[in-house]
Amino acid sequence: MTTSSGQQSRLGLTTMAWILIPVGVGINLVGHFIAQTLRLPIFLDVIGTILVGVLAGPWAGALTGLITNVVAALILTPTWLPYAIVNILIGIAAGFLARAGWFRDIPHTIGSGIIIAVIGVVSSAPITAYVYGGVTGAGEDFLRAYLYATGQTLLQGAITASAITEPVDKILSCLIVYFIVKNLPERYRDRFRTA
């Protein structure tokens, strides 16, 4: 863990964290666009949240997640808004995992991805089932539709589909962040709270 330079705001965020947050939001939106365009059964919409959490701490990660979902709800579709809590929790988890050294090597990074996937499943499945009736317009909808056709309830189908797709999505997202951070020059990593 490194200490960042610069003054901290009331939220405990440094100037570098405030600069990084919009970059993280942009990465999230681009990742989502790629996944949607290719109709992938994964999301790729939290890479920026995880990156900011790892580099600038849990509260910067949480803020990145919140802003991402608010912006996406305004410019893409309102379905993003209820999932803001998921993105916030992922940012917090990434920040604390990074502080605990869980992004220091590939095996720990994969472990981080699994932990973040569990958080994603537990927090998103009830929203998918009860707010959206099991259909959100994501690539995962095909899998959920199959599960509902086999007799699973809305919540069971949402949990099962998420349990299949979330680990792939979150482990991949964490590995992308790991390689981004590891390839940052040391002088840039030193400007953030954790790396």
Image (cartoon, rainbow, N blue to C red):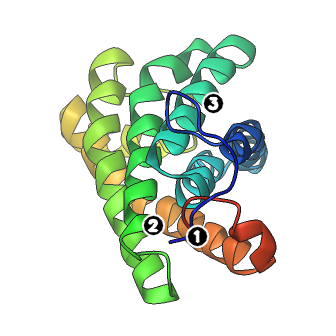
C-alpha gap between disc 2 and disc 3: 21 Å
Amino acid found under the numbered disc labelled 1 = Ala
Residue 168, placed above or below residue 125: below
Say which residue label 3 marks: 68
Say which residue label 1 marks: 195
Amino acid found under the numbered disc labelled 3 = Thr
Query: 62 left or right of 64?
Result: left
Q: Residues within 10 Å of mark 2 (few under 14, many from 20)?
A: many
Residue 41 at least partly seen: no
Residue 17, placed above or below residue 164: above
Q: First in sequence: mark 3 or mark 1?
A: 3
Whole-percent x, y for residue 123 in the image? 29, 37
Asked if the residues shown at circle 3 and circle 1 are in contact, with their CB atoms under 8 angstroms apart, the answer is no
Whole-percent x, y for residue 11 in the image? 49, 30
Whole-percent x, y for residue 171 in the image? 49, 69
Say which residue label 2 marks: 98
Q: First in sequence: mark 2 or mark 3?
A: 3
